[in-house]
Each structure stands twice: as structure tokens, then as C-alpha cells.
Image (cartoon, rainbow, N blue to C red):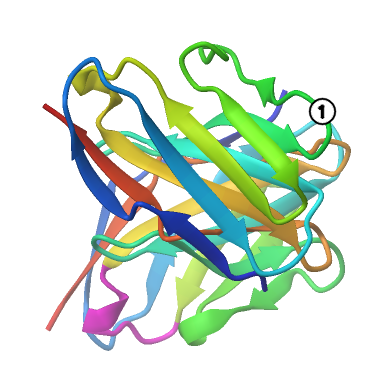
Amino acid sequence: AQSVAQPEDQVNVAEGNPLTVKCTYSVSGNPYLFWYVQYPNRGLQFLLKYITGDNLVKGSYGFEAEFNKSQTSFHLKKPSALVSDSALYFCAVRDSSASKIIFGSGTRLSIRP
Amino acid sequence: SAVISQKPSRDICQRGTSLTIQCQVDSQVTMMFWYRQQPGQSLTLIATANQGSEATYESGFVIDKFPISRPNLTFSTLTVSNMSPEDSSIYLCSVTGGSGNTIYFGEGSWLTVV
């Protein structure tokens, strides 16, 4: 069975500071990992993904994520946060042999000016 | 990435009625997925809809409550039947696209049942 965990319901960061949103996963095969963002009253937007290759993947809006196989983690990062980054962030995982994606519980990111 | 359009975007529905949500994609896709996002919650997969076959429902979801149609490779509908306030949610249509089968979402249909 596949699962994904986001241990923090909320992350608060000052504008200009680096941010990290945590995600850990469990799959039986090779993981496909994703991050999505949901702005207020909007659907989900794809940010980035890891399928294979370089462990550090770069995505939209200056976000990046690092795949760590030994720790089964895929934390989302950004070197310098913006107020406009405030949103709900979802980590998701799919086993390479499965068709459906499982979502984490979400982390609300709040960036204060 | 695929462009996904959903209708209606929002609706307020009476208890006991049914509502059909439409999902239109700008390209042909094999698999379409319907998710539900209850207020303040994460996404839960309702069913997978493949063209030419019956939808595959996840545990806790049944065809009588959430009938799905998939008449062609660019269109699907989800009906929420006999609605109750507990059905108040965002319903999201999604498709796979790109290498690695990334899932892309529509803007969702925001339903409130009163």
C-alpha cells in the first residue's frame, strides 16, 4: 500500500526567509512524487515532480524539492519566501506500478510580511 | 499540460436533489479521475473513469451515489445523487499527462448542499 504524510498542518515563515514544507512517503515500488499548491478558492496547480534522475528537482515559482530515498522524504523548499506563496500545499505519491495518486493531508503555508 | 474545464464552477443545491458535473479536456486522455475535497480536508479519490468501461470506485464510494459517464476520450461526468449536507465539497476532475503521468486538475466544482 502507498501512503504519504505531511507532519505539519501549518508552517509560518517571514518573507525573505527560506521555507521548508515536509513530506514523507511509503510505497512498495519506485515512487513518483509530486507537489501541488492550492490558492484560496482555486483548484490544484502542479508545482513539480520527481520520477527519476537528479534528486533535486526544480519547479514553478522558484520552488524545489529534494528526493531522499534513505529517509523516504520529498521536502519542498524555497530559498526566499514571498507573501504570495501563502497557500495550501499538498504532497502526493504514486507507486510506479499503480495508476492512482495518493495525497497528503496538506500543509498551510503562511508568509508574514 | 492538459487544459481541463469543469461545469458548474459553483452551485448551491437542495437536499435530496442530484447534480451532474461535467469535465472537458482539451486533448484525448486515457484515464480521468474524480476527487472530492471536503472542507478543510485533503483530496480523496472517488473513482477512475476509463473510456469504454465501467468506472472503478474506491472504497467508500458507490455507483448509485456517484454515477460516472465517460462517453469519449475528452469528456466525463460525475453525478452526485440524492445530496445531503455531507456532500458539500469541492469535486475535482483530473487527468494524467506528460511524462511520468503527472495528474493535472480542473478548477473544481464547489458544491454547497442546503
Residue at coordinates 70% horizontally, 74% vertically from top-left?
Answer: A56
Chief SS of the magenta region: loop
Mark 1 residue element: loop
Q: Toward which corner of the image does residue B105 lie, by quadrant?
A: bottom right
Is B15 situated above or below A16? above
Residue B54 is at least partly visible in this image: yes
A84 part of magenta stretch: yes
A4 displayed left or right of A51: left
- The residue range painted magenta reads A79-86
Q: Is residue B64 left or right of residue B100?
A: left
- Residue A61 image position (x, y, % from top left): 47, 85
Disc 1 marks a residue whose amino acid type is Ser
The x and y percentages for residue A51 are 80, 61
Chain letter of disc 1 in the image: B
Crowding at label 1, few (<14), some or many (≥20) Cα neighbours within 10 Å? Answer: few
Quickly name the residue at label 1.
B53
Tell me: residue B83, above or below residue B88: above
From the image, which quarter does the C terminus of chain A lie in? bottom left
Q: Residue at x 62, y 57 (%)?
A: A34
Q: Is residue B23 part of the magenta span, yes or no?
A: no
* Image quarter hosting the N terminus of chain A: top right
